[in-house]
Image (tube, coloured by chain):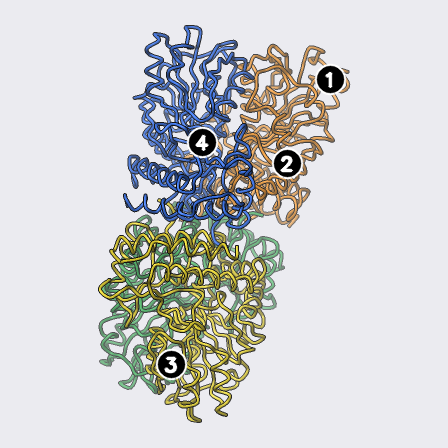
Chain colours: A yellow, B blue, C orange, D green
Amino acid sequence: MGRHFLQIPGPTDVPDRVLRAIARPTIDHRGPAFARLAGEVLERLQAVFRTRHPVIVYPSSGTGAWEAALVNTLSPGDRVLAFETGHFSALWCAMAARLGLVVDLVPGDWRHGADPGAIAERLTAAHAAVMVVHNETSTGVRSRIPEIRAAVDRTGHSPLLLVDTISSLGSMDYRHDEWGVDVSVGCSQKGLMLPPGIGLNAVSPKALAHRGRLPRSYWDWEPVIAANRDGFFPYTPPTNLLYGLRESLVMLLEEEGLSEVFRRHDRHAEATRRAVRAWGLEVVCADEREHSSSLTAVLTPDGHDADAVRRLVLERYDMSLGTGLGRLAGRAFRIGHLGHFNDLTLAGTLSGVEMGLRAAGVPIEEVGVRAALARLEESA
Amino acid sequence: MGRHFLQIPGPTDVPDRVLRAIARPTIDHRGPAFARLAGEVLERLQAVFRTRHPVIVYPSSGTGAWEAALVNTLSPGDRVLAFETGHFSALWCAMAARLGLVVDLVPGDWRHGADPGAIAERLTAAHAAVMVVHNETSTGVRSRIPEIRAAVDRTGHSPLLLVDTISSLGSMDYRHDEWGVDVSVGCSQKGLMLPPGIGLNAVSPKALAHRGRLPRSYWDWEPVIAANRDGFFPYTPPTNLLYGLRESLVMLLEEEGLSEVFRRHDRHAEATRRAVRAWGLEVVCADEREHSSSLTAVLTPDGHDADAVRRLVLERYDMSLGTGLGRLAGRAFRIGHLGHFNDLTLAGTLSGVEMGLRAAGVPIEEVGVRAALARLEESA
Amino acid sequence: MGRHFLQIPGPTDVPDRVLRAIARPTIDHRGPAFARLAGEVLERLQAVFRTRHPVIVYPSSGTGAWEAALVNTLSPGDRVLAFETGHFSALWCAMAARLGLVVDLVPGDWRHGADPGAIAERLTAAHAAVMVVHNETSTGVRSRIPEIRAAVDRTGHSPLLLVDTISSLGSMDYRHDEWGVDVSVGCSQKGLMLPPGIGLNAVSPKALAHRGRLPRSYWDWEPVIAANRDGFFPYTPPTNLLYGLRESLVMLLEEEGLSEVFRRHDRHAEATRRAVRAWGLEVVCADEREHSSSLTAVLTPDGHDADAVRRLVLERYDMSLGTGLGRLAGRAFRIGHLGHFNDLTLAGTLSGVEMGLRAAGVPIEEVGVRAALARLEESA
Amino acid sequence: MGRHFLQIPGPTDVPDRVLRAIARPTIDHRGPAFARLAGEVLERLQAVFRTRHPVIVYPSSGTGAWEAALVNTLSPGDRVLAFETGHFSALWCAMAARLGLVVDLVPGDWRHGADPGAIAERLTAAHAAVMVVHNETSTGVRSRIPEIRAAVDRTGHSPLLLVDTISSLGSMDYRHDEWGVDVSVGCSQKGLMLPPGIGLNAVSPKALAHRGRLPRSYWDWEPVIAANRDGFFPYTPPTNLLYGLRESLVMLLEEEGLSEVFRRHDRHAEATRRAVRAWGLEVVCADEREHSSSLTAVLTPDGHDADAVRRLVLERYDMSLGTGLGRLAGRAFRIGHLGHFNDLTLAGTLSGVEMGLRAAGVPIEEVGVRAALARLEESA
C-alpha cells in the first residue's frame, strides 16, 4: 500500500499528468493534428539539447540512439577514441566494435570521468570520432565535456564528438551547440520523465555533412529530417509517447524552467552526498568536480553485499534502487534522484536507504537523513 | 515538480489504480453489467463495516450520510444525546438541531473522546438516540465505542446508537454488528481511498424497524434497500466512483487484509507520535487509550501560529496539512497518515513537518524524523 | 470488441478527455488550487443555465437536486401545481408528496408537454409553486417553458416556477433568467457529459428570498452560497467530478459554443425522427412543437415488445437503448442522441436500431438509416 | 464533438482499457514484477503468431522490425526474391537495397498478391531469402502464403521465407509455424490495437541457425532471446506499451478468441465490399481469393480525386480514411476495418464514406450502407 518509490536512475517516476497525456487516443500520423504535435515536440527538444540544429526522434530505446549516432557518421573500419568510465561506456564501445569499428579505449577506474588529459596523448588524425558518456549511469560520475572539447581542439584534429547524455539530459546542464558536440544521444525515460520507448539524436551540421558508409536504413537521419520539415515521419511515429513528451517538455521548459530544474537536481544530489557521508559511507565518484546530479552510487563496506541491501529495501520499504553493474556488482548500489522528484520524496528515499542499511547490518552513523534535511533547509 | 504530499486527514491520496478504475466509461445503470458491479461493491462494504446488514450508498458527501442517519430514524422534536468531542461532533449536532431535533450535549475539552461515564448520568428514557463520532477528525481522538455501548446498556434504556466512522472506516478497527451500532456513517474520501462523492450508512435491523417521521425522500433507506436486492438504485448511482470503490475494497480486503491495514495505521500513528514527542511538542489527544490511528493533531507552542507552519510547509515542501478547526484554529495542525500510505511516505511527511516547524521558528529538538524511523524499524 | 454504444438518454458517453480529467489526483478542498477550480466551474455553470444568479453544486444525483429545489423554497403543507408529462414528472410529484407538500396534478397523456392553457384554469393564489419538467426523459417531449411563464404571469399569481432541466441542460436551448425560472434543476450525466454524481440548482433572487420552512441542512443553499464566494464548500465537494465538469464546460461553451451545441442536437433529433418515420413507426411525442432534441422515444406496434428489441440490440450490436418507463413499459424504447455525439455515431446508432427491429420481427420499411443520412447531408 | 472515427488501416483505435493499462506507472525493468509481465506477454505473442519459437519485441516501429528480419539473417550482397504487391513491398525492397542486398523484384499490378507461379520461374539457388508482404496495407490485397511456401518447396531451393504480417497479425488467419515462415514481421498499432512503438519478429529455428553477416547490434536477436529467458531485455524495454500489449492480447486470445476475431474481420470486410459494389465502385483487389479482411481500398472513378473525398470526410464527418499511396495516390482511398471495431462502428464508417462520396460529387448508388447492413444481418 502506498506508492512504490522508483529510485533507480531510470526509468524514473512518470508524472501522472504525463501518463494521462500518453493515454490519449492515438491519431492519424499523416493528419494535420499530428503535424502540430510533432512541431511542438521537435521545437522544445531543441531547447532541451540547447541546439538550433535537428533533433531526431526514434521509436527505440537509448541503445538504439547509440547505434544511430554511429551508423550515420562512421564507415566500416573507422577508428574511434573512447573512455572507460563505467558499464555503459563499455556497452557503447562493444556496440561500436560489433558494428565494425575499431575502438581505442582509454582505460579508467570507474570513479572518474573521461580524462581530458588523455586526449592529447591518445587522439590522432586517424580517429574519426571521440565517444564520451556525459553522465555515467553506472557510477554517478559526470565527464567534463567542455574540457574534452577544448582538449580535442588543442590537438588540431577534427574527429566528431559523440556524447551520451542519456542520464543527464533534462536533469543536468548540457549544451550541444555551445560545447561543440556533434551527436548527442538521449532517451525518454530519465530526465524527460517518460516511459521508455524514445531514442534521441541531436546532430550538428558537421555530423550531417560527414555521412559514413555503415549500412543504415531505419536509423538514417536524412529521411527523418526531410519528413520532419512538414511535421511527419518516414516511419510510424510513437504518437502516444510524443503526447507525453510534449507534456513533460512543457513542465521542464515552461513551468519550472531548465535552470531551476538543474538547480533542483544539484541540490538533491548534494543533500544525498551529505547523507552518505553522515552514514560514514563512500560515494563512487572520486572527484569533487565530477559528481552526477541525477544519481549517486554508494559503495558498501567490504563484506557487505550491496544487493542484499537493495533486496531488503525493496521488500520492507517498497523502494527500487539501482544495482551495481559490471565491476561494481555487489559492491555498490545506486540512488536515482532525477526527474519528477522533490524534497519530501528525497527525504523518503534517504529514510528508506538508512533503514535498509541498518536492516542489512551495514554499520552506519544514524544522522544521514538529518544531514540531508539540513542541506535542504539551507536552500529551501 | 515531484508529487504533492496530500497529508490532510481526507480527502486522502487516491491510488493511481483507483483513479484509472474511475476513468472507465460510464455504463447503463439499469443493465446487467451494472448489477454485477453493485453486487460486488455492496458485499464488500458489509465486510468493511463488519456487518451482515444493509449498507446504503449515497451519491453525497459524508455530511449527507450524517443527515440520512438522522432523517431515517428520528421524528421532529426527538431528543438525542451527543458528545462535544471536537469540530465535527459540533457540526453534526448543529445539523440535528436544524432538522428539528433537540440535542443534549455532553461538553468536552476536545482532547478526550466521548466519555462513557457520562452516559449513566445523562441518558434518559427520553433520548431517542445517542450520537458519537468514533474518530474526531478535528482532534485525532478516538472514542471508545464498545465502552459507550456497554454504558448505554447498563442504563436499561434503548436509544439508537448512531456513530460517525468517517475518518476511521477502513483505517481503524471498527465493528458495526459486534459493537451494537445502529447506524454507522461513512464516506469515500478517507480510508476508502476514493475521491469525495459517496456517503455511506450501515444500518442495523433495529434502526430499520425504528423509522422516524422526519420528512425524507432522497435519503430514504427503504427504496434503496429494495432496489439493491437486484443490484440497482432508485436514483442514478455514482457509477464511476463505484468502479473505484470496487478497486479500493479489493485492495483493502483481499490484497492487504483489514487486520494488516489496521496494524499499518497503528504503526504509522505511533511513529508519528514518537516524532512529535521527540520534537518536544504535544499531541492534542490527552488519553493514551484514545489516540487516532488515521491522523495526529499537533499543538504548536503558545505564540506560534499553526497556520503559519502549514503555509510554509505548503510553499516550500508542497505538502498539504490539515488546519486547526474551531477552537483549535491557529493552535494546532493535523497530519493525515491514512489510506494509501506507507513507511517512506511517512518519512517524507514527517521530514516536511520537521523542516516546516524549524522554518517557522517553532523551537524543536531535531530528532523527530529519526525517532519515527526507529519506531518503524522496530516492526519493519 | 469495439466500443459499446451507450444510447440511453443518460448517463451519456463521457468524452475520454473528461474521463482523464476526472482521473487527476484529488487535492485539498480548502487550498488555493481548489478555490480556482471552483471559481472556473461556477462561472461557467452560470453560462450554461444562462443566469447571473447562483448555481449550487451538490454531491448528489439529479433526484437530490429535485429535493433541494423543494426543501429550500417550500413549507410543510404548501400546495404546488404540477403536470403529468411522464414518468419523471410523476416521480418528482411523489417526492413532493413524501416531503409533505400537497400536489395538484394536471393530468396528461404522456405524449404532450405541460399545457400552458391549464395554468389559467388551475393556478390559484394558494399555489406556492409550479413544477414543470422541461424535457421529459421518459417520453422525449419538451414542455414550452416561456409559454408556461407567460400563462402564469397572466393569472396575476406569483408562485415560484421550478423547472427540471435534467435531460435538456447543455443540449437544448434553456434560459433560466430570461424565462423567469426560479429554480432550475440539473445534473451531471446528461448533456454535461459527465458521470453521475453532481446535482445542480440554479436559483433566482426571488427563490432565495422566499425560504420555506421544510427542514433542511445538506440541501440548504445559504451556507453553500456563502462558502462559494471564496471558492469553497460547506461539505467536502466532489473534486474529481469538478475536474471533469470544468473540462466538459470548456468543450461546450468555449470550443463548440452553446448555439452550435443546440443546433447539433436539433439536427440529430430531426434525422432520428426521419428514420423512425421511414421505418413506418411512430414517435411518442405527438406535437411538432414539442419534440425533444436530446432523445427520441419510439412506439413499437401492438404485439411487439419494445424490451425484446432492446435486448436483441444489446446482445447482437452492443448498444444500450432506454427502456419504456411506467405506462410506456414494453410499448416504447428510447434513443439517446445527446452529449458527446456526432453524425457517424448517429448513423451507427440508427443502423443498430434498424437491424434490431428487423431481428425482433417488427415490420419496418428499410429506408430508415438512409432517410437519416439524407437529413444529415442537407445540413452537413 | 463525439468520437473521431480513426478508420485508417493503422494505427487503429486503441481500446480505452488498453490506454488505461499503458497509463500505469513505469516499473523497474530489472525487477521481479517486470519479469512476470514480460513472461505473460511473450507467451501470448507466440499464440498470436502461432509459433512455438521465439518472438522478439523491439522498441521500434514496424519498419524497424523489417530491418531486424534482414540484418539478422542476411549478408552483404545476398540476393533476395521479392514481389511488387504495393507501396509497402516497395519500401521493404528499398530498405533491403540500402542495406546492401540485391533484390530481384517480381513486378505486379498492385491489384494482386504475390504470384506463387512466379516462384518456379524466378527462384534460384542464389536467392538467400524470399520476401513477401502477407497483407499489403496500401492495396488491401492478401498474398497466399501457404501457396508460396508450397511453390518454394517445389523448387527444391531452401531460401528463408520472410513475411510482413504488419496489417494482418491479430486480424487475419496467420500461422508462422504451420506455413513454414522463417521470419514474420509485425508491429503494435494494427490488429494488436496498441499505439505505435513496438516491432516484432517471430523467428524459426532455421532463421536462428542461419545468421547473416550484416552488421547488427540493436536488432541482434541473440542477446534478446538470451535475456528473455529470465524475463528481461538487453535494452530498456517499452514497459508501458507492454502493459497495453498484455491487455490487448488477453482481449484477443482469451476473451474473444482468435478464430472469432478472424471471423469478425472477414465479416466486416465482406460487408464493406457489399457497400462498395452497391455504390457502383470498384475495390482495388482484383482476385476474389485475395481480399484483405483488415482494410478495403476503393478506387474512385476517373476524374474524381480520392483525396478530395478523404478531406471532405475528415472535415464534415470527423473520420480519417487512408490515402492512396504511390501509384494509387489520388485514385483510391482506404477504409480500415480492423482492430477494436464492431458492427455499429462499421455502419458509422460506411455512412461517413457514403455521405462523403456524395458530397464530393462521386456518382454513387444510394444503397451502400443498406447493403452492408443486410450482410451484417445475415450473420448477426
The quadrant where residue B203 appears: top left
Label 4: state its secondary structure. loop
Say what amino acid the circle numbered 4 marks. Val
Q: Which residue is mark 1?
A: C158
Judging from the image, mark 1 belongs to the subunit labelled C
**Tag 2: amino acid:** Asp
Using the rendered image, report if marks 2 and 4 lie on a common chain.
no
Name the chain letter of the residue that bears numbered label 4.
B
| Residue ID for mark 2 | C230
Which element is circle 3 on? Answer: strand
Point out the image quarter for the C terminus of chain D. Answer: top left
Q: Which mark is residue A83?
A: 3
Q: Are marks 1 and 3 on the same chain?
A: no
Q: Which mark is residue B284?
A: 4
- The amino acid pointed to by label 1 is Ser
- Label 4 vs label 1: CA separation? 55 Å
Confirm or deny contact between disc 4 and disc 3 (CB under 8 A): no
Query: Which percent across, then down, holds residue D246?
Result: 34, 55
Real-space Cα distance between discs 4 and 3?
61 Å
Mark 2 Cα-neighbour bin, 10 Å: few <14, some 14–19, many ≥20: few
Using the image as rendered, state which of residue B116 and residue A136 is in the foreground.
Answer: B116
Residue B309: image location, x then y, percent:
53, 42
**Of discs 4 and 1, which sits in the foreground?**
4
Check if mark 2's residue and mark 1's residue have beta carbons within 8 Å: no
Please tell me whether mark 2 sits on a helix, a strand or a loop.
Answer: loop
The crowding category of the residue bearing disc 1, from other C-alpha atoms within 10 Å (few below 14, some 14 to 19, many at least 20), is some
